[in-house]
Amino acid sequence: MSGLFDYGSAFSRNIGWVTPAEQARLRGARVAVAGLGGVGGAHLLTLARLGIGNFNIADFDQFEVHNFNRQVGAVMSTVGQSKAAVLAGMARDINPEADVRVFGDGVTAENVGEFLSDVDVYVDGIDFFAIKARRLLFKACEERGIPALTAAPLGMGVSLLYFKPGAMSFERYFRVEGRDEMEQYARFIAGLSPAMLQRSYLVEPGAVNFSERRGPSTMMSCDLCAGVMGTSVLKVLLGRGRLRAAPWALQFDAYHQKLRYTWRPLGNANPLQQLLMAFIRPVLKL
C-alpha cells in the first residue's frame, strides 16, 4: 500500500494556506514531541497531516482503558501496547516517508540531548504531574536555542504558552525551583491558566485529586490543543505572523466561548499571579 503514497498528493490540500515552497520546508522540518497521551498524540497526528516529515517522539507508558475518553491512540486493540510504538505507526500510516525516531523509555537526563538532536521545535505533551521531566526538557531547549511550546487541556478549552529562544524562560516564568511538590503544582496551574476560564464549570470537584495525581479531561480540549499547537508550530517553522511569547499566555474556552490573552511580567512573581496562587493553594489540599 505504501507504493500508492505520494507526498505531493497527500498534502496538496494544504496548498493555498501554505505555498509549495513552505510545504517543502515543513517536509524537511523535525519536531520533537514528548508525551503521547491526550494532547501529545493529537499533536503528533495533526503535525503529521500538516506534512512535517521528521519527528522525535517519546513516551514510556502503555495504553489503558481509562485513556479512551481523550487519547487518539487508545482503542481496544492497543490496550497494553506502547504509546510511542502505536503513535509512531499511526504517523507512518499518514506519511510512510516520515522519519520517526522513537524513544520508548521516555526522556531522561541521559538521553535528552539525543532526543533534541536536529530538532527545530519542541512540542510538550507530558503529563501535568511530570514537572521534573518537563523542567528538564524546557531547560535543555533553552540551552540549545530550540523554540518550545505547551498547549494545556483545561476543561473544554486550551491554554498556549510559547517559550521563544532569548525571551522569558520556562524557569523564569513558572518559578518552581526549590518548592515542594504541591507548591510546584500550584505554580504550574497558575502559570498555565492566568485567566482561569475553566474553573466555573467544574461540577465534580472531587474528580481533581493531586495526591493521587489525577484529574478530569475531555477530548474536545485535546482537539483544541492540537489545532492551536499545529498552527503555532507552522508559524514558528515558517516565520509567519506574530506569536506572543511568555510572559504572554493565550486561553480559549469553548464552553464559555471566550478568548483571553494575559501578560504577566515576572511570571509567577507578578502580584496578580501571587493572588491567583493564594486562591489555588487551598484547593490543592482538599
Image: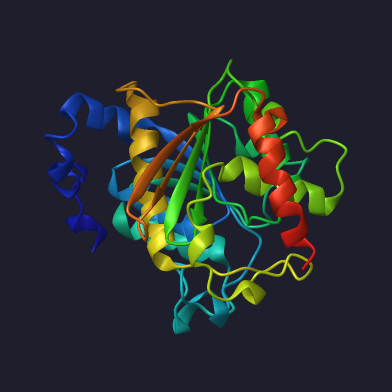
Image quarter of the C terminus: bottom right
Could you say which is closer to the camera, residue 123 or residue 156?
A: 156
Q: 216 above or below 17?
A: below
| Residue at figure coordinates x 53%, y 23% from the top left | 164
**Residue at the farthest top position:** 166
From the top left corner, tell me how far across and down residue 134 is, in percent: 68, 44
* Colour basis: rainbow
Could you say which is closer to the camera, residue 166 or residue 267?
A: 267
From the top left corner, tell me how far across and down residue 45 is, in percent: 37, 54
| Residue at figure coordinates x 66%, y 76% from the top left | 206
Horizontally, is 113 left or right of 158 in the view? right
Could you say which is closer to the camera, residue 78 or residue 173?
A: 173
Determine which quarter of the picture holds residue 163.
top right
Determine which quarter of the picture holds residue 267.
top right
**Residue 5 visible in the displayed image:** yes
Horizontally, is 18 left or right of 153 in the view? left
From the top left corner, tell me how far across and down residue 82 is, in percent: 58, 68
From the top left corner, tell me how far across and down residue 135 is, in percent: 72, 39
Image quarter of the N terminus: bottom left
Horizontally, is 197 left or right of 144 in the view? left
Could you say which is closer to the camera, residue 78 or residue 99?
A: 78
The image shows a total of numbered marks equal to 0
Q: 203 above or below 37?
A: below
Horizontally, is 60 left or right of 163 in the view? right
| Residue at figure coordinates x 71%, y 45% from the top left | 277
**Residue 112 visible in the displayed image:** no
